[in-house]
Amino acid sequence: MASLLDDAKPGRSTLKVRVRDSEYAICSLTHNEIEQQSLDVYFKDVDEPTLILTGVNSINITGNIVQDDDEFIPSEEEEDEDDYGPVQFRDPSDQNFLGGFELRHFGLEPHSPYYPDTIDLRKEESDEEDTMLHDNIAMGLINAMMNSGNDTQVKKAKAIL
C-alpha cells in the first residue's frame, strides 16, 4: 500500500522504481484526490530495485519482504504428479491442441477444411465449471485479437463481441 502522509501538501507525487536500467512509475498520488493506492509488486534480489520519489510529498509504503527459502522441499502432497511424471498435466500421446486453442474450438467461427480436427469444446461441456473455463479461454483469445494491433483481427474480435 502506498499512501500520502497526514501533513501532505497540494500537488502530485509519483513513486517509481528503477530495475535493470529501466524506470517504471508504480503510482501517482495527489493530495485530496488520490491519497492512497494498493500495490501488488514483486521483485527478486537479482532485480536490485531502487525506489524513486518525485513530487512535493513523501509517500508511505507498507508491504512484505519475503526471503527466498533455498532449502524448501515440497512435501509429497504439494508435488503435482500424474502418470507421466511431475508437473505434466496432459497425456503425451494426446495431440489435440498442440497448436493452441482457436475460436473454432468454441463454436465462435466455422470449422475449416484446412484444419483436420472438428473439435467443439462447447459440445463436451458437462457442467457449469466447464462452461466457465471455456468462456474464460474464449475471452482470452478474443482479448488477444483485440490487442494484436492487426486491424483484421480487431475487427473480427469486435464482430464476435
Image (spheres, rainbow, N blue to C red):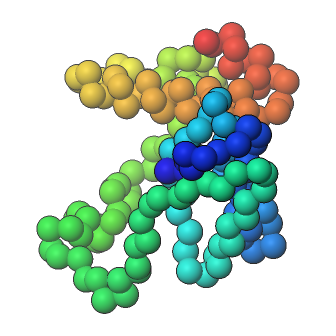
In the depicted structure, whether residue 122 falls above or below residue 67: above
Residue 85 is left or right of residue 6, and the answer is left
Question: What residue sits 55% from the left and 33% below the top?
Answer: 140
Left or right: 71 as drawn, with respect to 140: left
User: Which residue, as the protein is rendered here, is positioned at the far front?
Assistant: 7
Which percent across, then down, holds residue 120? 43, 24
From the viewer's perspective, tell me whether residue 74 is left or right of residue 7: left
Residue lying at 69% horizontally and 38% vertically, measured from the top left: 30
Q: Relative to 111, does residue 101 appear above or below in the rendering?
A: below
The correct choice, above or below, for 108 with respect to 6 in the image is: above
Whether residue 18 is situated above or below residue 95 in the rendered picture: below
Horizontal relation, residue 23 to residue 33: left or right: right
Q: Residue at x 63, y 31 (%)?
A: 32
Does residue 100 appear in the picture of this structure? no
All told, the count of numbered labels is: 0
Residue at image location 59% in from the left, 38% down from the top? 35
Looking at the picture, how far across and down is residue 117, in whole percent? 51, 33
Pick the front one: 110 or 6: 6
x and y percentages locating residue 153 in the rendered image: 76, 25
Q: Is residue 60 visible?
A: yes
Between 61 and 80, the one lying in front of the other is 61
Given residues 34 and 155, the one toward you in this image is: 34
Quarter residue 149 falls in:
top right
Please identify the quadrant where the C terminus is shown.
Answer: top right
- Percent coordinates x, y for residue 75 in the rendering: 17, 76
Image quadrant where residue 111 sits = top right
